[in-house]
Amino acid sequence: MSSSGERMIALKSCEGDVVYIKETGAVQSLFIRREMKFIKADPAYPPIDLDMINTATLNKVIDYCNHHAEFANDKAALDSFDAQFVEFDGNTSLFQLIHAAHYLKIYSLMDLTCRTLSQNIKGKSIAKLRRLSENSSDNGECLI
């Protein structure tokens, strides 16, 4: 339980780190929502294993889901958050978020990250796009 009394869902990254997401944020992911059916049936259910997502990316996804759950009725707050959320030093994190959103089936995040990617690649040369693509595929042990 969180300090607000809300139930927390345990998620395990590909690096073995266990992180927690509020249940209201977790239900934005169709993948996690499906897994939550098993958790409710068995309180001793282990963390949901997300062996495709690294801890840093998972934490960013959790921030997104929790914020969108908390401010679901405040479009201005969500728009402001989303604009800052997709600002990165490089595109590698953006590619990782796209893959994580797809894997977890979080369609609002998928839309946001793909829209951002399309804006970032507009007007780039083929060589620059190849470099971006090559950099995004070097994620170490984890696939995302």
Image (cartoon, helix red, strand yellow):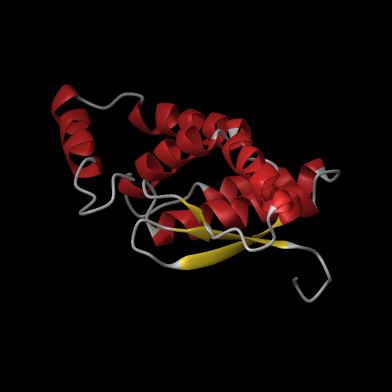
Determine whether 81 is above or below 115 in the image.
below
The outermost residue toward the left is 127
In the image, 60 versus 78, the foreground residue is 60
The location of residue 31, given as percent across then percent down, is 57, 37
Determine whether 120 is above or below 82 in the image.
above
The location of residue 105, given as percent across then percent down, is 55, 33
The location of residue 28, given as percent across then percent down, is 68, 41
Look at 19% across and 47% down and name the residue there.
138
Q: Would residue 41 appear left or right of 92 to someone viewing this image?
A: right
Look at 22% across and 34% down and name the residue there.
133
Q: Would residue 105 appear left or right of 52 to someone viewing this image?
A: right
Determine whether 87 is above or below 130 in the image.
below
**Quadrant location of the N terminus in the rendered image:** bottom right
In the image, 42 versus 143, the foreground residue is 42
Q: Residue 75's image quarter?
A: top right
> How many numbered circles are shown?
0
In the image, 130 versus 46, the foreground residue is 46
Determine whether 6 is above or below 126 in the image.
below
**Quadrant location of the C terminus in the rendered image:** top left
Look at 42% across and 67% down and name the residue there.
17
The location of residue 38, given as percent across then percent down, is 65, 46
